[in-house]
Image (tube, grey):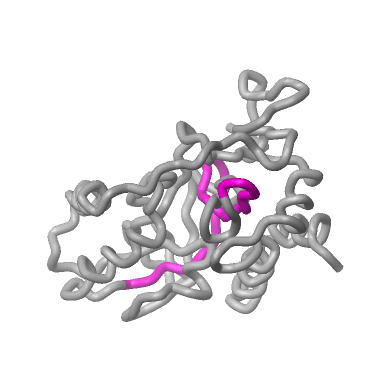
Amino acid sequence: MDRHPDRPTASETPPASVSSGPGCTQYPPDIGLGRHLTQEELSSSLDAALTGWDGRQDLWIFAYGSLIWNPGLPVEESQRARVYGYHRGLYLWSRVNRGTPEQPGLVLALDRGGSCAGVALRLSAAKARTELETLWYREMAMGSYRPAWLNCVLADGRTAPALAFVMRRDVKSYAGRLPDEIIRKVFDQAQGRYGTTQDYVARTVKALREAGMPDPALEAVLHRCGAH
């Protein structure tokens, strides 16, 4: 059992100076410009993710970051929920929403190990495909996530498969676990079209606390690295 799921293993431990990837020790990182997926690629990705969905049953989305406080789509029901086998962390470099290619910000992603509390959002079967097209454009624009069906345990005891956006470790925008020194620089310097990483983290911390499922690890990052 991985007792410290957010720590790199011995084989993943970075050398003294790393310009990108897990354990990056310089900011800004060397992650390049990236590429936006074409409309055809986005549509193909969505089709692949929905292969196992019959189109008749309502569909659940597992929200663990900004989707909690800004879902951007109509939902039939929302429930506190938890998934196992993944945990939340600032693991994805953001070149647009919370930063720029020159000074990228960070956003949350699910990475393997542990568990994660969040909110399960139920979409109407009749409208799910249309709503997911909008969500795909928002979350999958650069293909940094892997859409996955995760077993979601709802607060009322039900379980349901839910679509979630899991971090891809094979992309240059995968940051892995970063030292506080780098996160402080990101909080201080990076700003994208939706604002700063610090604001993004603060909103997520507030939303999780208001939902009755505070994230002590994320709150500690905000306390250690944020402006006071």
Looking at the picture, tell me which residue is in the foreground, 122 or 140. Answer: 140
| The quarter of the displayed image where residue 19 is located | top right
Which residue: 51% across, 49% down? Answer: 110
* Horizontal relation, residue 228 to residue 16: left or right: right
Q: Seen in the image, is 179 located left or right of residue 41?
A: right
- What residue appears at the point 77 percent right and 58 percent down from the top-left corner? 188
x and y percent of residue 73 in the render?
35, 76
Please tell me whether residue 18 is drawn above or below residue 66 in the rendered image: above
* Near-viewer residue (35 or 70): 35
Provide residue 172's location: percent of width, then percent of height: 51, 35
Q: Which residues are magenta?
A: 101-122
Q: Picture coordinates of residue 93 (x, y %)?
A: 57, 47
Please identify the quadrant where the C terminus is shown: bottom right
Q: Nearer the viewer, residue 103 or 164?
A: 103
When asked about the image quadrant of residue 98, the answer is bottom right
Q: Is residue 156 magenta?
A: no
116 is within the stretch colored magenta: yes
If the image is split into quadrants, where does the N terminus sit? top right
Secondary structure, magenta segment, majority class: strand
Q: Is residue 84 above or below residue 71?
A: above
Name the residue rendered at 68%, 24% in the picture. 13
Decide if residue 117 is in sight here: yes
Q: Residue at x 43, y 45 (%)?
A: 144
Coordinates of residue 157 in the picture (x, y in percent): 42, 68
